[in-house]
Image (cartoon, grey):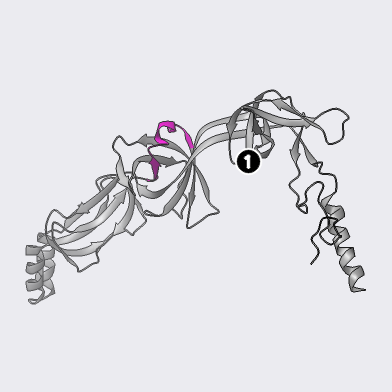
Amino acid sequence: MVMLAVFGVGGFIYFNANKSTTKSYEELRVSRGTISSSVSTTGAVEPKTRVKIQSSVAGRIEEILVAEGEYVTRGAVLAMLSSTERAALLDAAKLQGKSEQAYWNNVYKKTAVIAPMDGQVIVSSVDPGQTVTTSDSLFVLSDRLIVKAYVDETDIGRVKVGQKAVIGLDAYPDIRVNGVVGHIYYESHLQNNVNIYNVDVLPERIPDVFRSGMSANIEIIVQQKSNVLLLPVGAVQTRNGKTVVMQSNGNKQDAVRYTAVETGLQDERHVEILKGLSENAVVLIADTSFVLPGKKGGTNPFMPQRNRTQK
């Protein structure tokens, strides 16, 4: 029984090793679709114009009239403060009674902190009663949030003002925002020993979840074509220096012929076919299903051989 089992296994391996080595193929049809070439990079959400607001006089914050995240117009009062002299005078008057305090409060007016532009309050760093100096930052205003992309110098030549872009956030991967390239900076900076150029990408809309400093992924559309002939990248190969695809060779089973083609744009999955094939043309791609390794003319190691040395 042991010998029968051994010869059975050996026979199975032998016959599988000596099967026909003809390849099997999968049929694909040339179809029409949209393909694009893009530059993918990373960046960060930043204010387009960031204005830090400081007080013209040192003193004490009396009132805060805006909240962080609120939109304000130019000339709006953000806060009221008392100068150092006014604060000292009011504190002294308070000890003399309410009437004295009311008199000096009416005579000696507060100082207003005014918004210099339309924008959103993205930082409010003071509280009522806090003492500030002329060098302290009270608020930060932003006219609008944009995305600053970091583009490698090897790709910057493909990026142009006006190109469309798609923005994604690491914090919210399900949110995708369309944008457009608004400005390409003229000076580079060194990052990890690579020259990087900043590129301003202007979002078409600003979702509520956008926050200054968020990490972003940006895909800048360099070129896009619609209604073009497409094939999967795996169907196109190079043979004898030419770009070719495989097609059926008449009625001969498993026989193929190579058709030269001219290709255009290529992305991660598809390649554009410019010449050589028409719509709905059938091409072949090798079936990559796993098969047992074998060699034509192989021998069964369990079968006795004439020239095997006897021990």
Q: In the picture, residue 226 is in which quadrant?
A: top right
Can residue 272 be seen? yes
Classify residue 101 as left or right of residue 150. left
Rendered residue at 13%/64% (across/down): 105
Q: Is residue 219 above or below residue 278?
A: below
Front-most of 270 and 306? 306
Rendered residue at 90%/70% (across/down): 3
Front-most of 19 and 142? 19
Residue 199 locus on image (x, y percent): 37, 39
**Element at label 1:** loop
Instruction: Give the total of numbered labels.
Output: 1
Q: Is residue 59 above or below residue 18?
A: below
Q: Residues within 10 Å of mark 1 (few under 14, many from 20)?
A: few
Front-most of 284 and 249? 249
Q: Mark 1 is on which residue type?
A: Arg
Residue 156 magenta-highlighted: yes
Can residue 118 be seen? no
Rendered residue at 20%/65% (across/down): 62
Residue 294 locus on image (x, y percent): 78, 51
Q: Is residue 295 above or below residue 223?
A: below
Label 1 sits on residue: 269
Residue 111 locus on image (x, y percent): 15, 56
The N terminus sits in image quarter: bottom right
Residue 152 magenta-highlighted: yes
Residue 277 locus on image (x, y percent): 72, 25
Instruction: Report the magenta residues as a range.
Output: 145-164
Classify residue 272 as left or right of residue 54. right
Front-most of 305 and 211? 305
The C terminus sits in image quarter: bottom right
